[in-house]
Amino acid sequence: MPEQDFINAINSYRKDTLAKPFFVAVDDTQSYHGLCNALSLKSESEIRLSDFCRENEMEPDFDALVTKLKGATGFSFLIGLGEYLALAGHIKTNAILSRLKDTMLPKDAKAVVLLRGCRSVLEEFCKDPRLGARQVFLPQQAGMRDEFTVKIVAPDIGIDGAKWLKEALRNLEDGRDEICIKTDANPAFPDATVPVQRISRAYEALEREWPRLEGCGTTMDWNRLLKREHPSFRSFLELKRDGSESGYLTFVVNKTMRFSDFDRVKIFTLLDIPPNDPRFESFYAERKELLKDLSDADVAEYVAETKIKGVNRFHYLTDNTMLERKAIIECLDGVDTIPLNELTRRYPALADYLRDFVFQDEHLTEYFKQYKRQKVTNRIEAGFFEIVRENARTRKYNLLPTRDGVIDQLDKKNTTLYFVDAMGVEFLGFIQARCAELGLRLDVKITRANLPSLTRLNKQFYDDWAGKKFNDDRMLDKVKHHGAEGFDYQQTKLPVHLVRELEIIHDVLKQAKVELLSRNSRKAIITSDHGTSRLAVVNGQELKYEVDMKGAHSGRCCAECTVEGLDSVTPENGWLVLADYGRFKGGRKAAVEVHGGATNEEVIVPVIELTLAVADAKIEVKLVESVITANFKKTATLILFSTTALEDVSLAVKGKRYVAEILAANHWRVLLPDIKLAGDYTAEVFEGANLVGNVRFTVKSGVMKENDLL
């Protein structure tokens, strides 16, 4: 209804000689606000019905209102009456309007009564022939009426609202279209002609937003949500109402009836899906991301429950927590084959540990491939003892340069040294992968420690370093050798300490990157005093030979003396040093790994030089042809293309390194004489010691059929 129609009707009343109130019905809040603003500019006074309510009394004092009208001067308007009548109902409306319509105003006084929300009762009242257009304006109704609503709320559920009628009427007079009244009165306004909702529970106040979801929360959940104090509950309700793009989260929400169960169901529901279900891998990935911030305590019960899956337990674990990482290692105890592809998804750091680092000496590549596999699976395979014994007899590590000699030759200007106690070359595959991830370039030199492989005989290089230097406070050695952080072979025979080994080394690499990024150093050198042997602990063999002195350092060496018939021992620096997996009698038992002996894993240590990779030098490598042929006459050959000029390029396939020959700018040829079987292969591409990419290729036999000759 145009506002001007109201103004015209009111102006006609003001010109009329009628000395009684003029009643105007208003159907919508917008018109009400417009009229109030217009009348406030034209009138001498605004009369509010709420001003006639005594404190805490339900009924306004209509005697006082009538007295006010009879004494009015000039032009005034009354608000609040329509809202009150809508709450009071027909009987009171008839009585009050009958009284007010006959109230005589002083000479020259005019009073407009705005009635909002009570058209229906006013229409009934206007059937009285004594009322006519001179005293009532009922505009034509256009569309739905915009009535106000009232909520009666229990005082103890935490909803803000008017204390009772006086304050409620004041809110309605201000044009509010929804009000809350806090009262225990029941029923309240039983005869109201407008919607009155009684809310005795918090959910009733929220039901419109969350229909049919009351059972999802407790009374306290809904009370807190009503007070805007429960964002996690709101998020759960939104998922129940709106769903999620995450298939796993949708699956979880559909299984969860109550919010109190939500966190548990999020954690445990994956156990309901078999590993061969087409949804499993996507559910696994979504769940892993969803739960990435949980603690060991949060998942402890779940990890225990996964044991029910038996041989399939591995599929249900992630690397989000220390507890799960240890459980993955438990799953690999004694297995014949490690599922590397799946391990890359479950525990990438462990998969990187098992990556082959390709040494120039193929025997070392194969040795440490086998050593790491046996360390993870916690067993010594048939035939490996003989390899160790052969190494003990030949001691080929003596052909390697000494660590101290290599460090002496380094350019130490603007270089920081990081000393990681007990870090052998077994971790080089892991370090390669982490450096590629961190944007670090590395150059690796393979060296040997002094024998016996003890810290005090292999620390001079650190003490003599004149520049900036750091050490890891022997954290790696403490975990391996001194039972730090609860790792003790006498308590658990599983190699779960490997979890911390990888974390410690990764932390050192990150620390070195920060040092380089801050430009405090141009290079970082990471090296160690010695490595350690896990398999010597797993072997648990104490030698039958008597020696003059008790074994020291877990029995891996002893003071030099005469021993007959023991060809696996080497005299060094006044000590007898064992190069196999035996132990002299009398040495204290190790925690989880030992050193002091002369196995490859104890003696061979890396000297790693780190620099920052060029930020904008993204290296992409690809094959010119990914399908090649090879047979007894034709050597498998790959042509590699790189977007960046590279030097010292090589490929590693199944632990064997193949040097590439440059053909032209950015093109390299690699001959693979050992690959003759048809199948699919993956190769890692290196520039020097740096992993710069991976390529996949397919080999076909290329054998001609007889028909091809016709």
Image: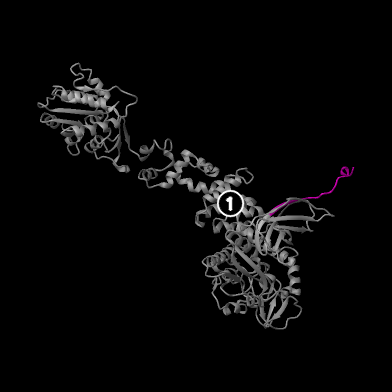
Answer above or below: position of 554 versus 232: below
Residue 703 is a magenta residue: yes
Answer above or below: position of 551 versus 367: below
Answer above or below: position of 443 versus 287: below
Query: How far across and down, in percent of the image, does residue 8 sit?
Result: 23, 24
**Residue underneath mark 1:** 306
Mark 1: which amino acid?
A: Thr
Query: How far across and down, in percent of the image, does residue 526 sit?
Result: 60, 70
User: Residue 274 lies in what quarter of the image?
Assistant: top right
Residue occupying the point 57% across, 54% down: 318
Q: Give the extent of the magenta segment.
A: 695-710
Q: Quadrant of the N terminus?
A: top left
Residue 188, visible in the rendered structure: no
Crowding around mark 1 (Cα neighbors within 10 Å: few <14, some 14 to 19, many 20+) is some
Residue occupying the point 28% across, 40% down: 161
| Closest to the observer, 399 or 524 | 524
Residue 48 is a magenta residue: no
Query: How far across and down, in percent of the image, does residue 17 sit?
Result: 13, 22
Residue 168, visible in the rendered structure: yes
Q: Quadrant of the C terminus?
A: top right
Q: Is residue 607 shown left or right of residue 382?
A: left
